[in-house]
Amino acid sequence: MTIIVFLRPKINIPEPMPYPHHGIGYMASFLRKHGHEVHYIDCAILDKPYSYVVEQVKQLNPDVIGITAVTTYYTEMKKLARMLHKLKIPIILGGVHVSRLPELSLRECGADFAVVGEGELTILELMNLWEDKKKRKTIDGIAYIENDQFIRNSPRELIEDLDMLPFPAWDLINPQKYPTKYYLFKAKRYPIAVVFTARGCPHTCSFCASTNFWQQQFRKRSPKNVVDEIEYLMNEFGVREIQIGDDYFNCDRNHVIEICREILKRKLDLTLQCPNGLRIETMDKELLTIMRKTGFYAFTIAIESGSQRILNKITKKLNLKKVYEKIKLAKSLGFFLMGYLMFGLPGENYESVRRSIEISKHLPYDVVALFIAKPLPMSNWFDEWVQDRDESEVDYDWFHFIEIESRLKYTNGKHTVKVPVDAYREFFLRPIQMMRYIKYWVYTFHFSQSVIAVTRRLIRQLLNLFNRK
């Protein structure tokens, strides 16, 4: 048996979104199932300096330390790893960023191993062989540096049967310890928990890191397994709303329908939403109707751009002509809809920005989230973007989509548009949209919020839009 402490660094971005870390949750439960002792310190919700974290790890006296990070807090990973070095305990890195840049991550963090790609089988084999310093360097799915030479072993095959994994270690990633509202999202009922029903996406959107991380393979859990976890969360943690975290929840419409049927069969009293985005063009009345009956009340439509030219360039494979028809159908069934749009995608210009702003106003979204596109490591776009750059000189703090102030300007010679601020202003400062936004706050009102607090926040946000230049 080994003792391992997992850590997630602080999330240092304008709008922190500390979801429970399901990757660590799954690895923790899988290791426990096979006899290892696991602890977890989530610095994203721990309002303490890293010196305190180091002392906590020291008291636990583990055999191994595991740190995971996505690109947006890779800098924090480096800080944390370097401080933990004084404990002289081996460090293993993991996550999407590390999987794309294992050598750089190992050297900059001074870590001993990197887990590349899907982590459960790799971390288990590594822990099982931990005492054998020779054999542990031979397993698939790891990378390390020996005698200043970078070594990357053969990739690990993906898990075929996701039902073989136990539920995440929810006692370590207790949903009640995390914020009840994520960026621009509110829930209808509380407490909430995020559940993943599948992994991967078969599409090839050039800006997406998930596509390559999961090797473009879509794998799903059985409907019974999914609903067993939902029922467990309801019984053990009092969860009353589920947010589906899948990259592509409706990739297999029959899978969604079977999950809905299983929830209905058990008569579970809960609400559900899909904040991570659905492919709207593949939705139909039968699917939307059973989702609504089951308790789904909101989902996101990530069209990314109002320009078909841009969508084709980033291989989004979305036909904008079909979007309005499907959104109109969803609205007729009573769904609350959020739109995702990104600015700064390859080939962007003034005309494409204007098309995105206009489509956001034309479609009956209740609210929108506007992002500045970045070539995230592990995406195809990053591979092109980084060709003429030194990966060690890149400022990875820059790689987050969320921008509060304008970061991009586009002009046609006569007119200039600044995004995202101008886009937000045009979208929200319309009477019909103000009414939708007020409805959004009322619709998601719950007992812990007063009417005064909601009103103050709404007024403050609208004033910010008026005052921004």
Image (cartoon, rainbow, N blue to C red):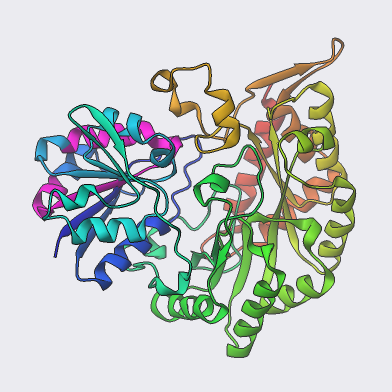
Residue at (48% x, 81% y) in the render = 228
Residue at (48% x, 47% y) in the render = 17
Q: Residue 158 at x, y = what percent?
A: 45, 59
Residue 374 visible in rendering: no
Q: Is residue 354 left or right of residue 340?
A: right
- Judge whether 388 appears above or below 312 on screen: above
Q: Is residue 24 magenta?
A: no
* Stretch of the chain drawn in magenta: 55-84
Q: Residue 172 at x, y = what percent?
A: 31, 63
Residue at (39% x, 46% y) in the render = 95
Q: Quadrant of the N terminus?
A: bottom left
Residue at (58% x, 77% y) in the render = 270
Q: Is residue 302 left or right of residue 127?
A: right
Q: Residue 426 at x, y = what percent?
A: 80, 33
Q: Is residue 58 magenta?
A: yes
Residue 32 visible in rendering: yes
Between 108 and 142, the residue placed more toward the observer is 142
Between 458 and 379, the residue placed more toward the observer is 379
Q: Is residue 158 left or right of residue 346?
A: left
Q: Quadrant of residue 256?
A: bottom right
Instruction: State how many labels appear.
Output: 0
Q: Quadrant of the C terminus?
A: top right
Q: Which SS type dominates the magenta stretch?
A: helix
